[in-house]
Amino acid sequence: MNSVTSAANVFRFLLGKGMIIAKSQKDMEKMRAVGELIAEVREALRAMVAPGVSTFELNKAAEKMMRDAGSIPTFIGYAPHGMVPFPYAICASANEQIVHGFSNETPLNEGDIISLDMACTLDGFVGDTAITVPVGNVSDELKNLIRVTEECLALGIEQCRPNKRVGDIGAAIQEHAESHGYGIVRDYTGHGIGRRMHEAPQIPNYGRAGTREKIRAGYCFAIEPMLNVGTPETKVLDDGWTVITADGKASAHAEHTIAVTVEGPEILTLTKEQKRALTLEVAEIASA
Ligand code: MG
């Protein structure tokens, strides 16, 4: 889930002039554990997506997995600055919905795309992740949108290194999205993460390289680009939460929770299997 711009201002005030909380090694172990857990939930949901399945079913499965593992679904009851408490364990946002969509009993249709955003709290720390999944066969236009969104996520993560700046993340994401003609959403952003889902800093998906806060080892970030086929403008539905594109065109979203280490970014929201595959890949590159 992302940081609403005005909510981010509240967090910044509470945290005292945007103080970013560096995690200790012990905290980092807990961030790894919750990251791996929420990644397992994400991959289970990805595998469930199919024509005829409802987001209600996906939400139910996610909540059960989170609770069975001893964690708390972080989104349920989340109510920044007087908003209606969010009622579900996941945000399920189809097609022109960008983020914060409500689950419902309507079956997904072949050709839809569905963004699934989820977070849980384990041992006092939060992991936050999102994917956009094609439902059955989707158009090449939508496949491309999802691919470029994932590339933007990877490029943003690549910037998360000591002595880089938060503006470097947004600049890398914006440049790639716009080079493909997509609108990059400004109204919702990534964020610091730890004991709270939304900590400082706010991490826009646009901006100028070399600006904003300096990045240091020990920081944990949720990086989450949102790309629109059309314009970046957004609207909120009457439920008070669901964000849609102003022009009604499709939108995609991808998110990882990462840790900044002295060696560079470490993606925390990977499953055990994904970490193993990544280690093999790195070893192959190193030996080539
Ligand atoms: Mg988030």
Image: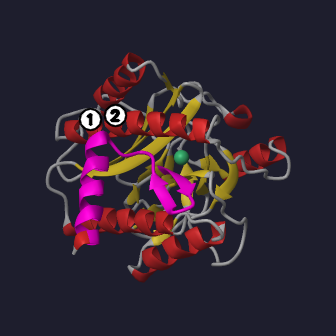
Residue at disc 1, secondary structure: helix
Above or below, comparing residue 124 to residue 269 in the picture: above
The residue closer to the viewer here, 145 or 126, is: 126
Give the crowd class for mark 2: few <14, some 14-19, many >=20 residues within 10 Å.
many
Residue 240 showing in the rendered view: no
Residue beneath disc 2: 41
Nearer to us in this view, 23 or 55: 23
Residue 136, which numbered label? none
In the figure, 256 relative to 263: above or below? Answer: above
**Residue 138 % position (x, y):** 19, 58
Residue lying at 61% horizontally and 40% vertically, measured from the top left: 194
Q: What residue does disc 1 label? A: 44
- Judge from the rendering whether residue 53 lies leftward or rightward of residue 187; answer left or right: left
Q: Position of residue 33 (x, y in %)?
A: 45, 34
Mark 2 within 8 Å of ligand 1, using the beta carbon: no
Q: Is residue 58 left or right of residue 93?
A: left
**Residue at point 44%, 45% (across, down):** 129
The percent coordinates of residue 91 (x first, y second) are: 44, 38
Span highlighted in magenta in the image: 257-286
Residue at image coords 32%, 48%: 275
Q: Can residue 229 be seen from the camera position used here?
A: yes
Queried whether the magenta region covers residue 11, the answer comes back as no
Looking at the rendered structure, the kind of residue marked 2 is Val
Label 2 sits on a secondary structure element that is helix
Spatial separation of the CA atoms under disc 2 and disc 1 = 5 Å
Q: Disc 1 marks which amino acid?
A: Ala
Residue 90 quadrant: top left
Circles 2, 1 touching at the beta carbon (< 8 Å)? yes
